[in-house]
Amino acid sequence: MECKRAVAVVFHHIGPYHHARLNAAADRVSVTGIEWSAKGYDRWGAPDSPPRYQKVSLFSKATDYYPRKAELRRAFWSALEQANPEVVAVNGWNNFGSLAAAKCCVERGVPMVVMSESARDDEPRTWWKETIKRQIVGLYSAALIGGQRHVEYLVELGMPRERIFTGYDVVDNAYFRRRAEEVRSQKSEVRQKYGLPENYFLASARFIEKKNLPRLIKAYAKYRQRSSAFAATADREVGRQRSEVSNGNAPWDLVLLGDGPLRE
């Protein structure tokens, strides 16, 4: 029987897309998914398939204010003892519980992989915070990140390039292919149910500030303005044939898919 390497992966809460990634990873390694909070605070819903990994919930609910840091460390230490992983993957360096997890791993001598989607231009940076980040990043043996911008930022924070790997943003392609085929098979009914236009741009995101949806809406407004200007030009140039031009170049609508505080 093949002996799989033991890996623990830590998130604040294991949402549906975390669940899909952990299930896929469980095909290759022995995975323990550790979540600080069994309760989720994002409106993702629950995974629709059983876990193929060992799932550990440290607290029924955990926020930035509860429980105390000492309780976080004790709970995580206990989980490490039970799982006994060869390596621990931690979400970020300043996310909920990440420092508590890092402290426990360092004290137990367990190598860590940081999972990150941070880029330098995500927000204004200050020198003293970046200095602290470099010290924290130096504790990790490797990194799993989203894309090139994240690679560049981690290199800037001191992580050797050869220890950085992309692929953190993977999705369950089979799931999306299956669901897309289901929708296409009843296209008219779905359009009618949700009031969808024939052509549209689709943005899927949590309605929270860091997703920068206001910028998207402003960009879309400029697109509509330019489309109107084009239609007016076509009207002057082709006169009666304007309808033929506009039908082929009618501006697309914008559909926002998601939920969150900014919905109001």
Image: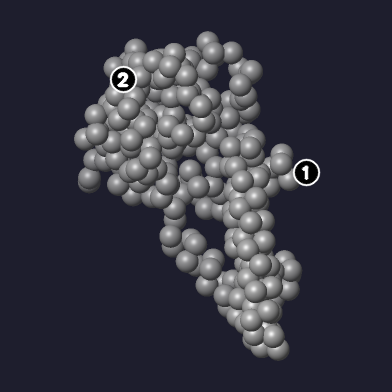
Looking at the picture, tell me which residue is in the foreground, 112 or 253: 253
Looking at the picture, tell me which residue is in the foreground, 193 or 212: 212
Local crowd at mark 2 within 10 Å, few (<14), some, or many (≥20)?
some
Q: What's the residue at 38%, 40% (across, down)?
A: 149
Q: What's the residue at 28%, 36% (across, down)?
A: 164
Quick one: SS at disc 2?
Answer: loop
First of labels 2, 1 by sequence position: 2
Local crowd at mark 1 within 10 Å, few (<14), some, or many (≥20)?
few
The answer to whether residue 84 is left or right of residue 162 is right
What is the quadrant of the C terminus in the image?
top right
List x then y, in percent, for residue 202.
60, 60
Type of the residue with mark 2: Gly
Q: Which mark is residue 138?
A: 2
Residue 237 found in image quarter = bottom right
In this rendering, is residue 238 above or below 204?
below
Instruction: Point out the residue furthest to the front here.
Output: 236
Quick one: SS at disc 1?
Answer: loop
Q: CA distance from mark 2 to mark 1?
A: 41 Å
Looking at the picture, tell me which residue is in the foreground, 90 or 7: 90
List x then y, in percent, for residue 205.
59, 48
Query: Are the residues at dot 2 and dot 1 in contact (C-beta closer than 8 Å)?
Result: no
In this rendering, is residue 69 above or below 205?
above
Type of the residue with mark 1: Glu
The answer to whether residue 74 is left or right of residue 213 is left
In this rendering, is residue 18 above or below 63?
below
List x then y, in percent, for residue 263.
73, 45
Q: Is residue 180 visible?
A: yes
Identify the residue under disc 1. 264
List x then y, in percent, for residue 187.
63, 76
Q: What's the residue at 43%, 35% (across, down)?
A: 119
Q: Is residue 23 visible?
A: no
In this rendering, is residue 20 above or below 8?
below
